[in-house]
Image: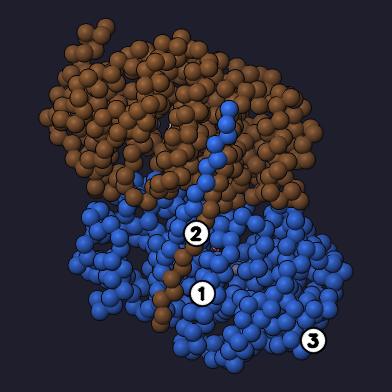
Chain colours: A brown, B blue
Amino acid sequence: METIQQRFTVSFSYPVLFTTHLFDPSNPQLRLFFETFPGGDFRRKILFCVDAGVLTAYPELPLQAAEYFRSLPMEYIPEWVVLPGGEAAKNDPALFDAIVDAVDQFGIDRHSFVAAIGGGAVLDLVGYAAAVSHRGVKHIRIPTTVLSQNDSGVGVKNGINFRGKKNFLGTFAPPVAVFNDFAFLATLDDRDWRSGISEAIKVALIKDKVFFEWIEANAEALARREEAPMHYLIHRCAALHIDHIGGGDPFESGSARPLDFGHWAAHKLEYLTDFRIRHGEAVAIGIALDTYYSELSGRLTGDDAQRVIKVLLKLGFDLFHPALGEDDCAHLLNGLREFQEHLGGRLTITLLDAVGKGVEVHEMDDTLIRQSVNRLRSSHLAWA
Amino acid sequence: METIQQRFTVSFSYPVLFTTHLFDPSNPQLRLFFETFPGGDFRRKILFCVDAGVLTAYPELPLQAAEYFRSLPMEYIPEWVVLPGGEAAKNDPALFDAIVDAVDQFGIDRHSFVAAIGGGAVLDLVGYAAAVSHRGVKHIRIPTTVLSQNDSGVGVKNGINFRGKKNFLGTFAPPVAVFNDFAFLATLDDRDWRSGISEAIKVALIKDKVFFEWIEANAEALARREEAPMHYLIHRCAALHIDHIGGGDPFESGSARPLDFGHWAAHKLEYLTDFRIRHGEAVAIGIALDTYYSELSGRLTGDDAQRVIKVLLKLGFDLFHPALGEDDCAHLLNGLREFQEHLGGRLTITLLDAVGKGVEVHEMDDTLIRQSVNRLRSSHLAWA
Ligand SMILES: NC(=O)c1ccc[n+]([C@@H]2O[C@H](COP(=O)([O-])OP(=O)(O)OC[C@H]3O[C@@H](n4cnc5c(N)ncnc54)[C@H](O)[C@@H]3O)[C@@H](O)[C@H]2O)c1
Ligand SMILES: NC(=O)c1ccc[n+]([C@@H]2O[C@H](COP(=O)([O-])OP(=O)(O)OC[C@H]3O[C@@H](n4cnc5c(N)ncnc54)[C@H](O)[C@@H]3O)[C@@H](O)[C@H]2O)c1
Ligand SMILES: [Zn+2]
Ligand SMILES: [Zn+2]
């Protein structure tokens, strides 16, 4: 009997907006968004989920939001779901259940919104719960860290950990909008301010030499926590990520992952340190490692490699961790095998041919990896 | 600062194949599928999850499959995950965890396959677990009931129940292939054989008059469990569902759901009877109710309405349930309100203008609903 072939395409689209003081009564952005959102005759509700770290720093938020939504043509749920910030958000299945319970209790349907305010971890958790409740309620992200504003929060992935396995459960589920409110960054601690900058360096190194040079020129100002350059950095980094995702393979059906430059070692390092180092801090080390590797394997000039190291150091990143070298790098090399497994058996790693020019390779040499680690270790002593 | 607009489309495609004795060594279908599946250089694994009802009826399956896969270029996992059949599969969160654990334990990655063999309930559970493990491992469906072969198994939805709420958690996640093996139907009990036929009547009534006339002509043969007409019915019904999903709004971003003809009452009836009546049995009653309603509201001729009732009766469906009329239809009418809530406040219901011609309406009249129920009740006495 004849085979039937199903075929269709689905279109996705969402704006990423940049603003300050989103809930200020004079800020029109949210109002404009809701007033022009298609399907105005649906009865819509909005439920907020917030990172406890953010709520502590901004305890007035729920009242401000309640006031803001008073004049909007939708039902605002005054009860907020408060979630612990950081990786803890993704480790406890009860938090997932709590969000789904709230969706149920407050009658959030597929035409209503769940908005998440917080760092990348809380956004990943809430995005996942929203994506699978009723097979997907509308999801709004309001990222509050550098990393989530310039990378994780503007993309299409979400996820939680399962029995300690990082991001084991998750979906590809585009939000309906992302609001990057720069005012939140003021209360970040220095590690979180710095951490997300490594994603900008990453994407500049593989795609945009001019942006990398801008980061070099502004490294001190960024390290001093000047606001204007940080706003530019976030906007440009977000734009590069958004272009890449939209222009490529958004739901990652292939195995190439150019945006994962520096990430194979970073992932392993996060595990080896029990997530005591931040994602962005691990990425900085991963970038340094793969930069040295690119040089040692004859791709990158020594001068270019030094520029990369220098900008990372200027920003205050620590570029070595003892876990890298432990047992003659056995753990780290295992991480490479695991990454290969994860990609379905075919390894794809991004290295650098030059500043601003990533290149994909399909194998890495253990000896050169060890040499890169040794070089990081000895430079580290010199830098200190 | 300038808003960035993300926009992209994602293409989906999968074959729905029709066969008998899928794991027979002489059946080339599975072999052909895997040999031509793109990306031959990935190391791929396949993990099977099976409905306990199916395994009891076909205890030789795992051995047959092991033998079949011996000559295929992939790693076959000999341990099968066995899941209780029927709605129980979707009620117990521990079963979801068991599938995710197996994905972890056997190292199923995004380039490997999870295949599900079973009725609609087991397919919904396994499809959900596969869709969220690693943000989606490749999923193959092997439906074994009439309903899952002609409707639920060929579509893009999956789901499980959450705290007793039907399909509260789920995703839209197309499989990579569906293999409809007719040989499985032999061991269905009569209720499950019959139940799925109502979905064919549903889709014929709203879209295909010629198919409806074919069902009328073959109703006795279908009721006698003749195989050839059942195979044709499943193929045609699956084709109509597949066309509709692919041509319309596959991930249901709007609120129109023409394929839900007869379903608003059916859903409520499933709840009111604690899922003691099958989905397809409830749909048959829902079709009868909305057919009378279409007649009473002046859309459908009395002759056409009688044809619908007659074919359902010939097939052996019971067309009334006391829960419909309880408390002067209060529960049923509540079901209509809940359906409206579920659609985001704007009601869309499909009725019939003629046999083969559905029409969308945005309100239903309580009095006419009560009259339709009364008519079903009194006809029921006459039919008995
Ligand atoms: N989905 C993706 O594509 C993707 C990509 C990269 C990383 N991630 C995930 O992102 C997570 C890391 O996110 P992160 O770096 O944003 O950190 P985070 O979410 O772990 O937050 C770090 C800390 O900052 C606090 N915080 C957040 N905003 C604050 C503010 N404005 N003021 C004061 N404190 C604030 C939080 O409460 C938390 O304690 C990881 O779980 C990682 O896996 C996801
Ligand atoms: N995903 C969708 O789009 C969609 C659409 C409609 C219905 N559904 C779901 O489908 C489910 C109903 O599915 P169903 O009607 O296939 O029934 P079912 O899955 O509930 O199975 C009914 C019984 O038949 C047994 N069984 C299955 N195949 C058998 C075989 N070949 N021989 C002997 N016994 C067999 C099962 O073990 C079970 O006991 C419901 O949960 C419903 O919500 C999903
Ligand atoms: Zn990253
Ligand atoms: Zn149905």
Q: Amino acid at mark 1?
A: Ala
Q: At x 25% / y 79%, what residue is drawn?
A: B26
Q: For this rendering, which residue is in front, B172 or A232?
A: A232
Residue B61 left/right relative to B331: left
Q: CA distance from mark 1 to mark 3?
A: 29 Å
Q: At x 48% / y 56%, what residue is drawn?
A: B173
Q: Amino acid at mark 3?
A: Gly
Q: Are marks 1 and 3 in contact (CB under 8 Å)?
A: no
Q: At x 71% / y 30%, what residue is drawn?
A: A28
Asked which secondary structure carries label 2, the reply is strand
Label 2 and label 3 in one chain: no
Q: Amino acid at mark 2?
A: Thr
Q: CA distance from mark 2 to mark 3?
A: 41 Å
Where in the figure is residue B79, as x and y percent of width and height?
A: 29, 57
Label 1 and label 2 in one chain: no
Asked which secondary structure carries label 3, the reply is helix
The residue indicated by pointer 2 is: A9
Q: Which disc number belongs to residue B238?
A: 1
Where in the figure is residue A26, as x and y percent of width and height?
A: 74, 24
Q: Dot 3, how many residues are within 10 Å of its Cα: few (below 14), some (14-19), or many (20+)?
A: some
Query: Ligand 4 is in which quadrant of the figure?
Result: bottom right
Q: For this rendering, which residue is in front, B111 or A368?
A: A368
Any part of residue B278 in sight: no
Instruction: Reply above or below: A235 against B98.
Output: above
